[in-house]
Image (cartoon, helix red, strand yellow):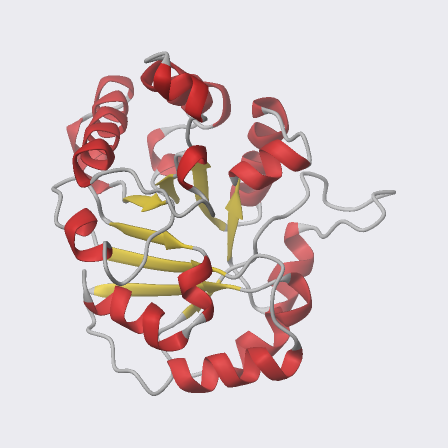
Amino acid sequence: MRKKIIAGNWKMNNSNSETNKLLRELKKNKFSDNKRVIVCPSFTQLSIAIEKLKNTEITVASQNIHFASHGPYTGEVSAAMIKNLGVFMTILGHSERRTFFYETDEILKNKVNTALKEEIEIIFCVGENLSDRKSKNHFKFVQSQLENSIFHLPGKSLQQIIIAYEPIWAIGTGETASPHQAQEMHSFIRNLIYKKYNQSISDSISIIYGGSVNPKNAADIFSKTDVDGGLVGGASLNPDDFAEIVRSI
């Protein structure tokens, strides 16, 4: 049975003191064992998060890694570097990385390969923009992202990936895909995995929703059969809101 997952993507936010305060408040909550809770601080806060969350069930993930193991890539961070801190999970393919830093499917394919080689678990993001949604090209667009970046993997490796569907038009806009729209895309993704691999692998892959999730809409979205949790942005910066979202699943 797939475990329910809530991941908080802090993006480029929080000082050291803000991180300490947020994690201190978050630790006051008791989350049930059938839920997996993840926080994704910026690189500068990873060490603090690892130390603060030691002996808890909350996982720490990075927001990105580079595809190379080392080299002349000023400002970049490798998989080996985050492992050295005790971090064994990363987000890859977030729409903001694709949009503002021009990360292509090929670049992400290389990052996926590197992460898995280094035994780093992945939250892999896919999702369409508003024009693709309006032109009814959204299914084809998401299918191409999956086929170009992760469907080259053997089934065993694919099972090290959590897929996050994040419609670009619903990120940081206050707009949210309806529960029906989320379920429709998640079901489509799961069926693609079934066709490419098999029923067992399809049933085992967690597919979470990202796109302006908040305490008011979380329960309705998470109630859908193929929605296994959420990748939470702004609401994850508020410990009470984030905890309420975790409890809603």
In the image, taking residue 96 as reference, residue 177 lies left or right, namely left
Q: Is residue 222 above or below residue 45?
A: above
**Residue at the location (63% across, 28% down)?**
107
Residue at 23% x, 24% y: name it.
Answer: 188
Q: Which residue is drawn at 43% across and 34% down?
A: 169
Q: In the image, residue 192 lies at what x, y percent?
A: 27, 21
Residue visible at 47% across and 68% down in the picture: 237
Answer with the quarter of the image where residue 207 lies. Answer: top left
x, y percent for residue 183: 19, 35
Looking at the rendered structure, the number of numbered marks drawn on it comes to 0
Specify whether 153 is left or right of 68: left
Of 209 and 192, the residue lying toward us: 209
Nearest to the observer: residue 180 or residue 194:
180
Give the left or right position of residue 29, taking residue 99 as reference: left
Residue 97, image x, y percentages: 61, 39
Q: In which quarter of the image is residue 144?
A: top left
Left or right: residue 37 versus residue 201 is: right
Depth order, front residue of 94/2:
94
Give x and y (percent) for residue 142: 39, 23
Residue 1 appearing in the image: no
Please, is residue 37 above or below residue 80 in the view? Answer: below
Whether residue 202 is visible: yes
- Specify the quadrant that holds the C terminus: bottom left
